Amino acid sequence: MATTVSHRVAVAGASGRMGQMLIEAIRASGDCVLAGALDVPASHAIGNDAAAFLGHASGVPVTADPKAGIAQSEVLIDFTRPEGTLAHLQACRERGVNMVIGTTGFTEHQKAQVQDYARDIAIVMAPNMSVGVNVTLKLLEMAAKSLASGYDIEVIEAHHRHKVDAPSGTALKMGEVIAQALGRDLKDCAVYAREGVTGERDPSTIGFSSIRGGDIVGDHTVLFAGTGERIEITHKSASRATYAQGSLRAVRFLAGKRSGLFDMFDVLGLR
């Protein structure tokens, strides 16, 4: 009989919406086990069982000490804030723990820091862990190459009222994929705001629009507007469960890897 491999996983932001979804997904999986749980010192969950919200005793207490939280883990999943993620990266590097990073809002300098950590541990970093979103990115790459001229490109995203960064990391990734397919640099062609008399649209630009409200999990549409036709490629998330399942696929991908920076295209074989 084959022996099931158990991946020992820690979760950062354990009491948050995404953290709880991850803990639930780990518990429901057949090959992952919760081995650590982290949260900020002010969290009401500190000291409590990480799975208490499910009415289940996991035996894993929530801690604010990164080193203690990852001590029994092989990989840490982190969907927190850039500053917290970088602190967790340092602890993971010291203990040889790999990371799956879904945090967004990194500066270019912070992204370079992540790359530096990846020389010592293996990291999967993606602004969106959803399998469907990453397949959508591949479709956008294909569409951009075929619609390279004569089409204006706009990225429209909508998220819940609590999201703190805009445009979303997923929207920016969509823009990056499109720009790269067109041989452009997103930093040079992105337009993030329009107000007043803006003049005619520069056909080489990629526009972004952000909507914030209610409990929208995440909607993204890329519009290719040509003469006489429009092509819209849309992905809508109804639940954070899809991010959790993608994260566990990333955990499995990292098994046995010692270093390197990867993304969901690597995890899903979309290169």
Image: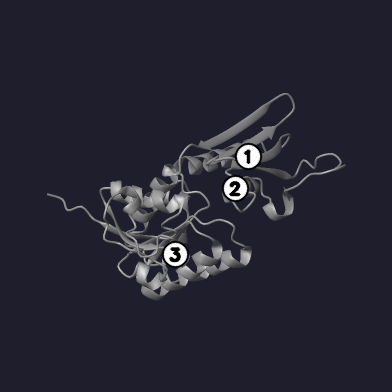
In-image side of 190 versus 80 (left or right) = right
Where is residue 37, by image quadrant? bottom left
Residue 34 rendering spot, x and y as whole percentages: 31, 57
Label 2 close to label 1 by CB (< 8 Å): yes
- Within 10 Å of disc 2 (Cα), the crowding (few <14, some 14-19, many 20+) is many
Which of the marked residues, 2 or 1, is nearer the chain's N terminus?
1
Which of the marked residues, 3 or 2, is nearer the chain's N terminus?
2
- Identified at 52% across, 39% down, the residue is 136
In-image side of 195 versus 244 (left or right) = right
Residue position marked by numbered label 1 in the rendering: 144
Residue 35 rendering spot, x and y as whole percentages: 30, 62
> Considering only vertical position in the picture, is 117 above or below 203?
below
- Within 10 Å of disc 3 (Cα), the crowding (few <14, some 14-19, many 20+) is some
- Identified at 36% across, 55% down, the residue is 251
Where is residue 197, by image quadrant? top right
- The colour scheme of the drawn protein is one colour
**Along the viewing direction, whichever of 25 and 220 lies nearer the viewer:** 25
Query: Mark 1 is on which residue type?
Result: Ala
- Within 10 Å of disc 1 (Cα), the crowding (few <14, some 14-19, many 20+) is some
**Along the viewing direction, whichever of 192 and 70 lies nearer the viewer:** 70
Residue position marked by numbered label 2 in the rendering: 177
Query: Mark 3 is on which residue type?
Result: Gly
Query: Mark 2 is on which residue type?
Result: Val
Residue position marked by numbered label 3 in the rendering: 260
The Cα–Cα distance between marks 3 and 2, rounded to whole angstroms, is 21 Å
- Identified at 61% across, 53% down, the residue is 164
